[in-house]
Image (cartoon, rainbow, N blue to C red):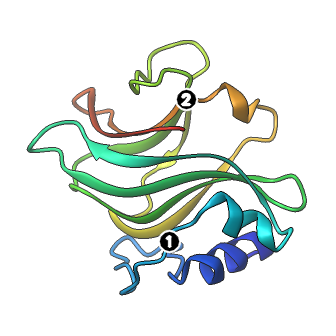
Amino acid sequence: MNKLQRFLAAATATPDAGDDATATPAASTATATPEATQATGMGELIAMGELIGSDSFHTASGQVLLVRGPDGELILRFQDFEVRNGPDLFIYLTPDPDGDVHVDGAINLSEIKATSGSVNYDVPLDVDPDSFRSAVVYCRAFSVVFATATFE
């Protein structure tokens, strides 16, 4: 776990699921705020949004944060989240606020690491984080958006 991951875990009182595909969130009502993230000088909150399922079958909840770490690294953090499991799920960042992953500028970050808990995804350093308007859980096998977090 790097410094940013340790900071975010401590600031939000939840463990990082890492590579554990069945991580369970800790019992906590704490949520990350811009003030909490910036208070220690360890990172800068760029954007955040609530994860919402696309329909009554593809349910989701939790918070998504886009953070720049102290060394300039970019992290997309799914915080205290839960999303319905499905085949071929991937995490995308997209400039579309409605979560369209097929627009210019959308990037596939990774196959999903877990369907619940708190998980970090590395964001390439060569992208402009301000260009993204949402994070998406997307099923490539069936071309279905499972969940979207529109950034505020």
Q: Tell me the kind of residue under disc 2.
A: Arg
Image position of 137 with respect to 71: above or below: above
Q: Which residue position is annotated with label 1?
A: 19
Identify the residue at horizontal 46%, vertical 25% (top origin): 97
The reply, left or right, for residue 7 in relation to residue 101 is: right
Nearer to the camera, 123 or 130 = 130
Q: Tell me the kind of residue under disc 1.
A: Asp
Q: Most extreme residue toward the right, as rendered? A: 71
Q: Quadrant of residue 125?
A: top right
* Element type where label 2 sits in the image: loop
Instruction: State how far apart marks 2 and 1 are (Cα).
Output: 26 Å
Q: Does the CB distance between marks 2 and 1 fall below 8 Å? A: no
Identify the residue at horizontal 50%, vertical 13% (top origin): 103
Image position of 81 with respect to 12: above or below: above
Identify the residue at horizontal 38%, vertical 70% (top origin): 21
Q: Nearer the viewer, mark 2 or mark 1?
A: 2
Task: Count the labels in the image.
Answer: 2
* Element type where label 1 sits in the image: loop
Q: Position of residue 45 (x, y in %)?
A: 70, 53
Q: Which residue position is annotated with label 2?
A: 133
Q: Position of residue 111 (x, y in %)?
A: 45, 49
Q: Position of residue 4 (x, y in %)?
A: 75, 70
Identify the residue at horizontal 55%, vertical 29% (top origin): 133
* Quadrant placement of the N terminus: bottom right
Q: Residues within 10 Å of mark 2 (few under 14, many from 20)?
A: many
Q: Most extreme residue toward the bottom, as rendered? A: 27
* Quadrant placement of the C terminus: top right
Q: Most extreme residue toward the left, as rendered? A: 56
